[in-house]
Image: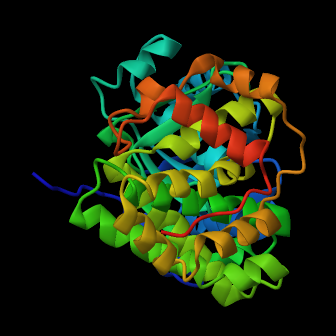
Amino acid sequence: MPKYFMPTMLLSGRNCIKRHPRRLIHGKHCMIVTGRNSAVISGALQDVIDVLEENDVKYDIYNSVTSLTGISEIYALGNTMRENGNDFVIGIGGGTTLDVAKASAVYATNVMEPMEIYNEDYPVRPLKVVCVPTTAGTGSDTTQYVMMSLDDIHKRRSFKSNKCFPYATFLDSRYTMTLPIEVTRHTAVDALCHAVESYLNAQASAFSDTVALETIRLIGSCKDALMSGNITEEDREKLLIAASSGGMAVAHTGLNVVHAMGHQLTCEKEIPHGRANGSMLVEFISWMGKHETMRAVEVMTAFDSDLTSFKKFMDKVVPTPETFTEEDIDLFMKNSIVNTVKDNCPGSFTRDDERQIYMNALVNKKRKYTEW
């Protein structure tokens, strides 16, 4: 039976944190989880602190999150929160920071060994988490998924629980205005991948389709700005909304081939997440055109493009200048994704398909596309 469940409250617009303090505050002692720079530079941290202080809410700040933050550090943070008596969490930052906030909220209320978090069945509900994204791409602020490094950036593993949906998310595009153009492009493409993978998915429904297509349209309306680098605040707002709605789509369907294959490039070659996923996207849509032709066409229509023009867009926004060999492809396929995606990928996805997508995306980069 088609269903849709997304319990996160979304509040958006300029100064939404200060306009909705009751949705930000969920106790008397908050732990603010941030990275080292973006929360300060964007102004988001100061806005949060202002509201907490105006309402006499005690707070601690953990500002050490980086791309290398692993499960042991997150586990220790959760224990610290329990010892401090923190009763809610505010995550300010990109996807890694928001995931750290979500995972530490589980550890704060449940006495367990670090890896037991992957059992996804917690006796005690995690602390309430409020998300304030400062990037526009990850979708962590609207999903039940959490990705963590297992104390090794090359070993990452996700878990999911409906108890890990954030309680509320504040979307203020002002916090993304200071993002470098490269980060803006990478995160926008990551959000686009979420939406496309949700729409071209065996678990898709009328509910998820509506959200996924609108996400694709929103990002498509910003494609010229993303290519030129001249991104206005209006573009930033569209991209921020699209990032959250893309998360809403995959919260229902799960991810697909693109993220599973892109993950290998990040692990083995340290290619940034959004760019790694983007390098797979055109070939995935092309492959899907053979199995779900009309839905692949609908993706391109929503983006207001054709496959050839879409390839030019991706080459401009997330280029893959690296040279790859067949030996690299063998390395990526060492941990084949076929079993991982078989439930979500329409059609019969085989190892031969996996290899062909890698080869076309990374080796045969100048091939021409046949439109459907």
For residue 360, above or below residue 159: below
82 or 241, which is in the foreground? Answer: 241
- The answer to whether residue 105 is left or right of residue 63 is left
- The answer to whether 108 is drawn above or below residue 111 in the figure is below
Tell me residue 13's x, y (percent). 54, 83
Q: Position of residue 332 (x, y in %)?
A: 69, 26
- Relative placement, left or right, of 92 versus 19 is right
Give the camera-side residue of 107 and 210.
210
Query: Residue at coordinates 54% horizontally, 30% vertically from top-left?
Result: 352
Closer to us: 121 or 130: 121
Position of residue 64 measured from the top left corner of the image (x, y, whole percent): 77, 38
268 w.r.t. 243: above or below:
above
Residue 26 can be seen, yes or no = no
Residue sitting at x 44%, y 71%:
297
- 60 relative position to 192: left or right: right
Q: Position of residue 257 (x, y in %)?
A: 51, 42
Residue lying furthest top: 113
Q: Residue at x 59, y 30 (%)?
A: 148
